[in-house]
Structures are given as structure tokens and as C-alpha cells.
Amino acid sequence: MPIPESPSLQSFLDHLKYERRYSQHTIIGYRTDLEQFFAYLASQFESPGLSAISSMMIRSWLAELKEDEIAARSINRKISSLKSFFKYQLKIGALEQTPMTTIVSPKQGKRLPVFVEEKSMEQLFSPELYEEGWQGRTERLVLMLFYHTGMRLSELVNLKYSQLDGAQSQLKVLGKGNKERIIPVSRELAAELQQYQSDKTGELAMADRLFVTEKGKPLQPRSVYAFVKAKLGAVTTVQKKSPHVLRHSFATHLMNNGADLNAVKELLGHSSLAATQVYTHNTIEKLKEVFKKAHPKA
């Protein structure tokens, strides 16, 4: 269970919030990992002081997580949280050395991104799939924007009309760490978004966000997730159905059609190329398929 708030933990979380400008969702993840770790120290080692925390204690906690069958991916995230926490303590002079130097992250299998085939994506935007009225119109535009831009769920629900440049057919998106990026959109989609905005009246017109409910309220992530899942279920049999699958589909289809890896990285708002390289797998598989069909010695 969570331990009482400690000054060292709160100082670190404030650092993430005000200096690193991390999102609230990310900060909650760090807090959860660290509170679990300190709760374990409290139960097993009587809450040692910061300088008394050893690599042995950390390995003991990680071993317990493994025994509880916590996935390697989750354990690696917790190790990353600990590394960031102790690195910050070194930076502010609260520690002279970190206990993380001998901690090794467990290996995890590569998870390939789930995506929807291009022919299925064409069916997804068929008007017949959506109810008439404001809700159906909103749902269709939301799905179109996810697939046309590769935006994250949090980026889309917080999108304002002022971020759309209709003349240049582009969107200014505020991503992780409050980093801005520009994403081009088709003239047709830009025009549809402009028309959607101009058709707002009454409470709808007072809304700050681009996408709103019939009552003029901002879309909630949970409701967006629900209708995206439902619409994808109507056109594809992929096991996972979520806004992130549309982001994966956006990137995969770009790569399969010859897009430059660095360009895809910028469009997705990735901080490193390594995160984008996962999409090259599907491109290689497609090349293998072409080779088998076309090469006489294949």
C-alpha cells in the first residue's frame, strides 16, 4: 500500500511536473511505481533512509515482482522510474551514488504494432457506419483525424480549433512534454473540420475544444475509446481495437508506401528514432512478399 508522502518523492514529482513538463498521466505512473517500491521497503526493511537503500533491496523487490508474474515490460518501466528518481537525487546532492548501477533490466519480447489493413480503413469512413446528427458526424471526423494524422488520444481530445490552419492544411499539435509539432492534413479534411466548426451554434459554439458532444462538452477519453472500439469492430477482426491502433495504422501505411523513417518520426512526435523503427518490420515483411512473387529464384 502507498506510504505517507515523503519530501524526497514529492520533490522529484514536482521536478517532473514543473521542470520536465511531463503530463499528469506520466507523473501518476512514476508516483505509482515509486510508492509501490517504498511501500515494499517499509514492509521488508523498516523504511531505510535514502542513502541506506541498496541494490540488494531493489533486486529483492524486483524478484518479488517477477514471482508475482508481473510482465517484463512493466518491471522495466518500474526500473526506469527508479533510475530517474535516484538520478535526480544525485543531481540535487541528496545522494553521492546511485544504487541502480548494478540493476539489469529483464529482456522482453518485441511487441509488433497492431494495425488495420488499408482496405478495411476505407470501409471505416463509410457514412453508412455512422448515425445521422451531431454525434455521428463527430465520431466520423474523430476517426478520420486519428488515421490521417496519427495523433494520440490525449492530443485529439484537447485539440482546439485555433490549432487548425485551414489555409495551409495543417494542424499544430501539442504532444508529450508540451512539444509542438506540425502535421499536414488533406484539403478535404481541413475543409470538413472548418465546416464542423462553423456549424456549431449555441452551447456548441461556446466550447473551447474542437470536438464536442451535442451539449457542447469536451469529449472524454473513455467515450472516444468506446466508439473507436465499436467502429473498428465493424470493419476488422484485429484483437486490439483502440485509438492507438489507428495511430499504428497511420504509421504502418506510411512506411509501407515508401515514407521516410525520419519523417514518420516527426509526424508521430517520437523523441527518438528507435521508437519509430518498430514500423519497419511490416515494411520488410511486405518487401519479402514482393520478392517471393517477383524474383525467379525466390
Image (tube, rainbow, N blue to C red):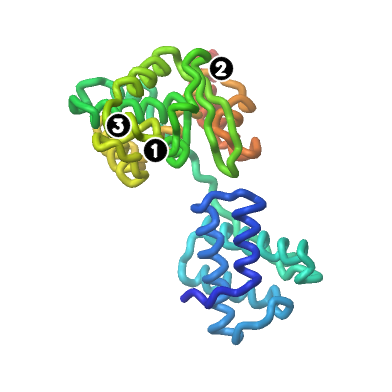
Q: CA distance from mark 1 to mark 3?
A: 24 Å
**Placement of the C terminus among the 4 image quadrants:** top right
Where residue 233 sits: x, y (%)?
A: 27, 36
Q: How packed is label 2: few (under 14 Cα within 10 Å), some, or many (20 or more)? A: few
**Label 3: how many Cα within 10 Å (few below 14, some 14–19, many 20+):** many
129 vs 251, left or right, is: left
**Picture coordinates of residue 293, whole percent (x, y):** 47, 16
Vertical comparison of 59 with 26: above or below: below
Within 10 Å of disc 1 (Cα), the crowding (few <14, some 14-19, many 20+) is many
Q: Which residue is mark 3?
A: 204
Residue named by callout 1: 243
Q: Nearer the viewer, residue 267 or 249?
A: 267
Q: Position of residue 106 (x, y in %)?
A: 60, 60
User: Residue 245 sits in which quadrant?
Assistant: top left
Q: Give the camera-side residue of 123 and 31.
A: 31
Taking the image as drawn, is residue 292 in sight?
Answer: no
Q: Residue at x 61, y 22 (%)?
A: 260
Q: Is residue 232 left or right of residue 110?
A: left
Asked if the residues shown at circle 1 and circle 3 are in contact, with their CB atoms under 8 angstroms apart, the answer is no
Q: Secondary structure at mark 3?
A: helix
Task: Give the label, 1 or 3, closer to the camera.
Answer: 3
Three-letter amino acid code of the residue under disc 2: Lys
Looking at the image, is mark 2 or mark 1 earlier in the sequence? 1
Residue at coordinates 29% horizontally, 21% vertically from top-left?
199
Tag on residue 297? 2
| Three-letter code for the amino acid on which mark 3 is drawn | Leu
Query: 18 or 16, which lies in front?
Result: 18
Q: CA distance from mark 2 to mark 1?
A: 42 Å
